[in-house]
């Protein structure tokens, strides 16, 4: 059965990197959640200031439950900040809040990689739900057509993960520029915010590597490129 195929070894480096990335973002965020800038601004305040500074007064900010569940919703024009960011005055909160505003700025400027990712989202949402069912049916029933369809669907997931990388790196870069321009964080504080964002970026790198490794594994298992 393909579950136990030796090609699973292809996933081991990605699994290790993913585990490290998760540990890194948790430990880095926890560390800089205890480091404060000395000001009285919260993560919400920082996000609001950056939004207004960039002419995005129409973007609402909402409080969402959870830890590191922060995100920008381009469909509704809402920036959602988590429990650990919304009312927090730490360097970590500032970095994450500014990063999510970075996505709002990308959206307002029609940043091409973000446009591509948003256009792919519905397809990828469907693909991620059905791809493994189709592939499993293909293997168990011996229907090569199902396997090929599954591989193509998974290819969309891989492309989505790869396009996500420049989107996230650019949002982090914009965040640092905005934080510096506000004149609230300096030197070590900026370095701390950058470390938080770099740790978060590693999780996206790990996700992309996992997706690519899984695609290669599926191609091998399905016999693509094999001569009859």
Image (tube, rainbow, N blue to C red):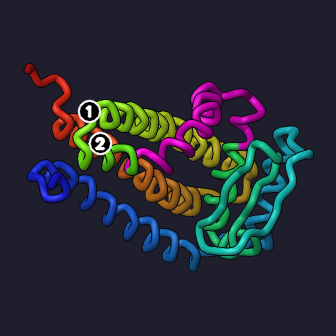
Residue in the foreground of this view, choosing between 86 and 12: 12
Residue in the foreground of this view, choosing between 83 and 220: 220
Quadrant (top left, top right, bottom left, bottom right) of the N terminus: bottom left
Q: Residue at x 38, y 44 (%)?
A: 134
Image quadrant in which you'd find residue 75? top right
Where residue 182 sits in the image (x, y, percent)? Answer: 75, 50
Where residue 101 sits in the image (x, y, percent)? Answer: 72, 49
Where residue 106 sits in the image (x, y, percent)? Answer: 69, 35
Pointer 2: what residue? 138
Residue lying farthest front? 141
Residues in magenta?
A: 104-132
Above or below 147: residue 7: below
- Residue 45 appears left or right of 12: right
SS state under label 1: helix
Residue in the foreground of this view, choosing between 82 and 140: 140
Pointer 1: what residue? 144
Quadrant (top left, top right, bottom left, bottom right) of the C terminus: top left
Cα–Cα gap, marks 1 and 2:
6 Å
- Say whether residue 118 is magenta: yes
Where residue 7 sits in the image (x, y, percent)? Answer: 13, 48
Question: How many C-alpha atoms fall within 10 Å of the one at disc 2: few (<14), some, or many (≥20)?
Answer: some
SS state under label 2: helix
- Residue 38 appears left or right of 112: right
Cβ atoms at labels 1 and 2 below 8 Å apart: yes
Image quadrant in which you'd find residue 68? bottom right
Query: Of label 1 and label 2, which has the lower sequence position?
Result: 2
Residue lying farthest bottom? 34
- Residue 2 appears left or right of 110: left
Q: Residue at x 83, y 59 (%)?
A: 61
């Amino acid at each position: 059965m393909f579950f136990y195929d030796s090609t699973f070894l292809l996933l081991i480096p990605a699994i290790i990197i993913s585990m490290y990335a998760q540990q890194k973002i948790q430990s880095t965020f926890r560390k800089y959640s205890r480091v404060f800038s000395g000001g009285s601004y919260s993560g919400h305040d920082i996000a609001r200031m950056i939004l207004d500074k960039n002419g995005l007064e129409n973007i609402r900010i909402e409080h969402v439950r959870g830890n590191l569940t922060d995100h920008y919703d381009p469909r509704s024009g809402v920036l959602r900040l988590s429990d650990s960011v919304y009312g927090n005055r730490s360097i970590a909160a500032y970095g994450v809040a500014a990063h999510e505003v970075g996505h709002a700025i990308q959206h307002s400027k029609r940043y091409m990689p973000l446009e591509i990712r948003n256009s792919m989202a519905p397809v990828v949402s469907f693909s991620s739900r059905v791809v493994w069912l189709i592939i499993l049916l293909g293997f168990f029933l011996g229907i090569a057509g199902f396997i090929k369809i599954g591989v193509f669907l998974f290819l969309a997931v891989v492309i989505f993960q790869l396009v996500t990388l420049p989107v996230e790196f650019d949002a982090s870069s914009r965040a640092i520029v905005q934080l510096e321009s506000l004149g609230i964080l300096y030197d070590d504080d900026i370095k701390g915010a950058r470390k938080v964002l770099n740790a978060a970026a590693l999780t996206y790198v790990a996700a992309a590597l996992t997706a690519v490794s899984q695609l290669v594994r599926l191609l091998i298992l399905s016999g693509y490129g094999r001569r009859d």
